[in-house]
Amino acid sequence: MANQNELLRILRAIPPKWALGIIGLLIGYWLLQPTANRTFGWNLPTLVQIVNNDVVPLEKKPTVTTEKKSAPAKASDSKAPGANATTSKKLPTPPAQASNAGKKSPDVGETDRQDNKQGPTFGYLKSLGRDRYASPEGLVYAPGSEEGHRLKHVERHIVDMPDRAGSHGVFEGSMAEFLTTIDQGYQKASSKAKGTKIRDEEGMTIMEITFDKKIGFVGGSEGRRKGNPSTKRLRIVLNGDRVITAFPF
């Protein structure tokens, strides 16, 4: 209540035109925050959390050296989203790993050290140089996101974050298994298989794939409230052949 009274006192102290502008920005943030969290897997706080000073702190982000943009390299068998596939390749089977259901979130990168000793490729990706990696299906994982690299962002979805606001999709399995499932989903969506959807949104390609078996569960505070329901659905967000994020939902 003290924070809210302080906010009202500040709004009364500034010119009316400025106050209307600030209120407009707050309303815009209130409308867009749930959509941004759901689509990109972000963890933006709600206005209530901001006003009550109840924002969950984020991990310290690694410093990323900006490199000159160049045309992304593709694996030889890369296919554009939405293209009809003429053949169905059998993807490599990753090493068997124990289920991570019920585990709490470790530090980013800890799962790589625990479940896979083969570095950032996880025994599945091919290095393209300059900290970029390609999957057998031609999906590229490169530097970016708040975590410093898209692999680190995707890696956050193999552990639950029960205190995170809203929903948090959790894949059950290791990072190598998750990368394989992402390739399988991309392959199914590209061939327009049953149970898949593709749409373009703000320059991004969003693929939604329904598998024949459970791939994970809904975590976060909303998932915990609902009893962590299981899910067979996967969402992949791409910019060309570059993976922005991927998570069960």
Image (cartoon, rainbow, N blue to C red):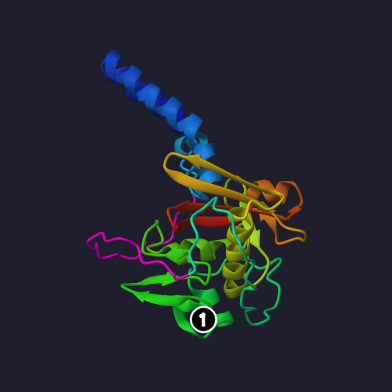
Residue, x 42% and y 28% (percent of image)? 26
Per the image, the residue denoted by label 1 is 113
Outermost left residue: 68
| Residue 70: percent from left, percent from top | 27, 61
| Residue 186: percent from left, percent from top | 58, 59
The residue nearer to you, when weighing 118 against 238, is 238
Number of marks in the image? 1
Q: Is residue 158 in sight in this rendering?
A: no
Outermost front residue: 86
- Does 73 lie within the magenta span? yes
Amino acid type assigned to the residue bearing label 1 in the image: Arg
Residue, x 52% and y 50% (percent of image)? 41
Compared to 140, does 3 lie above or below?
A: above
Compared to 69, does 6 lie above or below?
A: above
The residue nearer to you, when weighing 45 against 70, is 70
Left or right: where does residue 218 sit relative to residue 80?
A: right
The residue nearer to you, when weighing 119 against 137, is 137
* Magenta highlight range: 56-76
- Does 218 lie within the magenta span? no
Compared to 249, does 26 lie above or below?
A: above
Residue, x 53% and y 67% (percent of image)? 137
Residue, x 75% and y 47% (percent of image)? 226
Give SS at disc 1.
Answer: helix
Q: Is residue 90 in sight in this rendering?
A: yes
Outermost bottom residue: 117
Q: Quadrant of residue 57?
A: bottom left
Q: Which class describes the residues within 10 Å of circle 1: few (<14), some (14-19), or many (20+)?
A: few
| Residue 131: percent from left, percent from top | 35, 72
Main secondary-structure element of the magenta-colored stretch = loop
Compared to 198, does 175 lie above or below?
A: below
Left or right: where does residue 129 sit relative to residue 41?
A: left
